[in-house]
């Protein structure tokens, strides 16, 4: 194996015993990591502004403090606010209140790697990044399993950053599945590439193009939805469980033959060229600069695009069809 994979036996929760962990933010990752850490016997408080998340955290039994106060009480500060908000809140509320020698943690390296957050030299700066949406981080932990994760140390102020990170990874359930040691650069660039080119951007563009092709070909939108979106999950579940060959062993020979001859006609050398350009934009900081500027200018593009996408016929018919399948969780 090209990388070292760490498991339960490589991590000791003792590194976090008698320490206060402040989880800043209680959204997708925040609620999941905070609840898993607490269920692992660790001491967790939440740092938030007043609002919907603060109420949710209180309802879940957590003590909630303004960010500055939570940070001042904490030995470990895990920043789980949106990436575009982190630098400002760090400057104004986190850095001035950070205890000497505290551990500053992230689940994505964006702000540290692109120089938006520069921590004091005596701090530990590390990331533990679950390779999973937050809600699955919680769901798998409760089921007794976990999602894989990454650990990276940017700064080892106390000399204990790795032990703290591994204990944290164990606390949220990642060592049950396996934790890979990486760098902030590698985590940031691969995560951005994966979500843009394959997992989110690539997958939604492929699904929409397939849906539009069928509907423009005269087929019913309901048929097109079941074919290219609903069934995608079932196919991806098989890839997740057994890899590509295992999925192909379950589909018909007709589908397998079509997979081999048609896949490369749709995802072509041109597509790979485009992927390489996407990776270059990530590596050179162009994507990061555009995303930061988008936020600083009030998110005009995001607001308009969210509206346009919500109006797409695949969303309209999808909402109707999912409404008939009560077992599909929102
Ligand atoms: N989403 C995911 O599954 C994954 C996310 N990550 C990383 O985890 C981090 C968190 O992302 P994610 O969980 O998606 O974030 P969310 O958008 O789901 O949650 C953001 C949280 O931050 C709070 N917040 C926003 N602004 C402020 C502020 N000014 N002061 C205090 N709290 C604030 C929000 O509270 P409020 O309700 O008040 O707005 C909310 O609780 C990011 O670095 C992301 O890249 C990594 C792996 C996967
Ligand atoms: C795939 C998107 C992701 O990177 C994730 C869930 O891992 C994110 O930033 O949300
Ligand atoms: Mg990710
Ligand atoms: Mg990501």
Image (tube, rainbow, N blue to C red):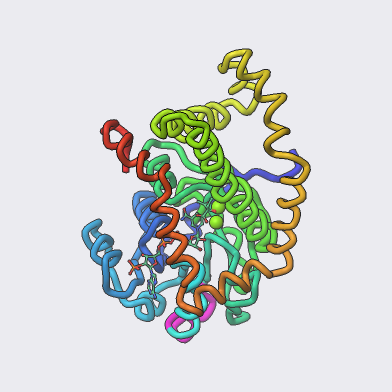
Q: Is residue 65 left or right of residue 77?
A: left
Question: Between 300 and 188, which is closer to the camera in this rendering?
Answer: 300
Residue 101 is at least partly visible in this image: yes
Coordinates of residue 246 in the picture (x, y in percent): 61, 21
Judged left or right of residue 167, residue 248 is right
Query: Which residue extends farthest top?
Result: 253
Q: Which range of residues does the magenta coloring cover? A: 93-102
Relative horizontal placement of residue 44, taking residue 187 as reference (left or right): left
Question: Which x, y percent locates residue 9?
Answer: 56, 42
Q: Quadrant of the N terminus?
A: top right
- Pick the residue in front: 67 or 18: 67
- The residue located at (41%, 30%) in the rendering is 220
For residue 31, above or below residue 225: below
Front residue of 117 and 198: 198
Name the residue nearer the viewer: 57 or 256. Answer: 256
> Would residue 20 be seen by someone viewing this image from the given angle?
no
Residue at 53% from the left image edge and 45% from the top image edge: 204
Query: Residue 64 at x, y = what percent?
Result: 28, 69
Quadrant housing residue 71: bottom left
| 124 to 37, vertically: above or below | below
The residue at 61%/19% (across/down) is 255
């Amino acid at each position: 194996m090209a990388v070292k994979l760490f498991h339960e036996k490589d991590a000791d929760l003792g590194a976090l015993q008698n320490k206060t962990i402040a989880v800043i933010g209680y959204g997708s990752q925040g609620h999941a990591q905070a609840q898993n850490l607490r269920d692992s016997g660790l001491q967790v408080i939440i740092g938030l502004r007043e609002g919907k998340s603060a109420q949710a955290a209180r309802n879940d039994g957590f003590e909630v403090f303004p960010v500055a106060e939570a940070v001042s009480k904490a030995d470990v500060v895990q920043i789980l606010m949106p990436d575009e908000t982190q630098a400002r809140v760090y400057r104004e509320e986190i850095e001035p209140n950070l205890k000497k020698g505290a551990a500053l943690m992230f689940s994505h390296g964006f702000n540290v790697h692109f120089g938006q957050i520069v921590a004091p030299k005596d701090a530990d700066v590390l990331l533990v990044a679950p390779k999973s949406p937050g809600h699955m981080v919680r769901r798998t932990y409760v089921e007794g399993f976990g999602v894989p994760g990454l650990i990276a140390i940017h700064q080892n102020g106390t000399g204990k950053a790795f032990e703290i990170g591994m204990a944290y990874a164990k606390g949220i359930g990642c060592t049950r599945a396996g934790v890979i040691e990486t760098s902030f650069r590698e985590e940031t660039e691969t995560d951005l590439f994966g979500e843009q080119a394959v997992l989110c951007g690539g997958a939604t563009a492929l699904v929409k193009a397939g849906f539009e092709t069928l509907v423009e070909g005269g087929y019913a939108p309901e048929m097109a939805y079941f074919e290219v979106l609903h069934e995608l999950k079932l196919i991806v579940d098989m890839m997740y469980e057994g890899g590509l060959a295992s999925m192909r062993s379950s589909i018909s020979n007709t589908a397998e033959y079509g997979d081999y001859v048609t896949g490369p006609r749709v995802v072509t050398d041109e597509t790979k060229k485009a992927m390489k350009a996407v990776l270059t934009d990530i590596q050179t900081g162009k994507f990061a600069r555009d995303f930061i500027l988008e936020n600083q200018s009030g998110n005009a593009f995001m607001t308009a695009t969210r509206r346009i996408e919500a109006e797409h016929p695949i969303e309209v018919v999808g909402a109707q069809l999912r409404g008939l399948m009560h077992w599909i969780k929102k």
